[in-house]
Image (cartoon, rainbow, N blue to C red):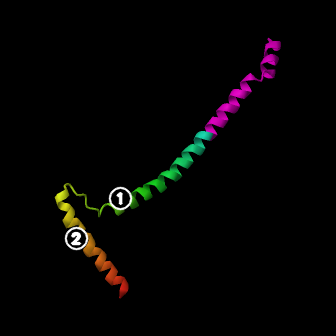
Amino acid sequence: MKQHVHQFVREESGAATVEWVVLTAAMVGIGLAVMSYVSEGVESLSEDIRDALSGFTIMTSFEEWDDFRAEQAAGAAQDEAAETE
């Protein structure tokens, strides 16, 4: 029995398993921390994109195109006039 205990203590094959478990746990922890940090930035960026796109008009037919061009030209003329003042 004593010989089996000494052989078990000297056995190193289980040490590699323990090392892999520790390394895997560390990688999971780092991954969760990075995901938390990145998700905050992505959420902020998606809100900025939502705010920027919320004012756009989507035309559903070509008949509206002339009206749209006239509105855009009028807006550009106003912007140009404001810049020259």
Q: Which amino acid, mark 1?
A: Arg
**Is label 1 in a helix, a strand or a loop?**
helix
* Residue, disc 2: 70
**Is label 2 in a helix, a strand or a loop?**
helix
Q: Residue at position x 25%, y 61% from top?
A: 57
Residue with the most extreme bottom position = 85
**Front position in the image: 63 or 1:** 63
**Front position in the image: 2 or 15:** 15
39 vs 6, left or right, is left
50 falls in the magenta region: no
Which portion, as a residue range, is magenta? 1-26
* Residue, disc 1: 50
Q: Please identify the quadrant where the N terminus is shown.
A: top right
**Front position in the image: 79 or 7:** 79
In the picture, residue 55 is in which quadrant? bottom left
Residue 54 position within the rendered picture, expressed as x and y whole percent measured from the top left: 30, 61
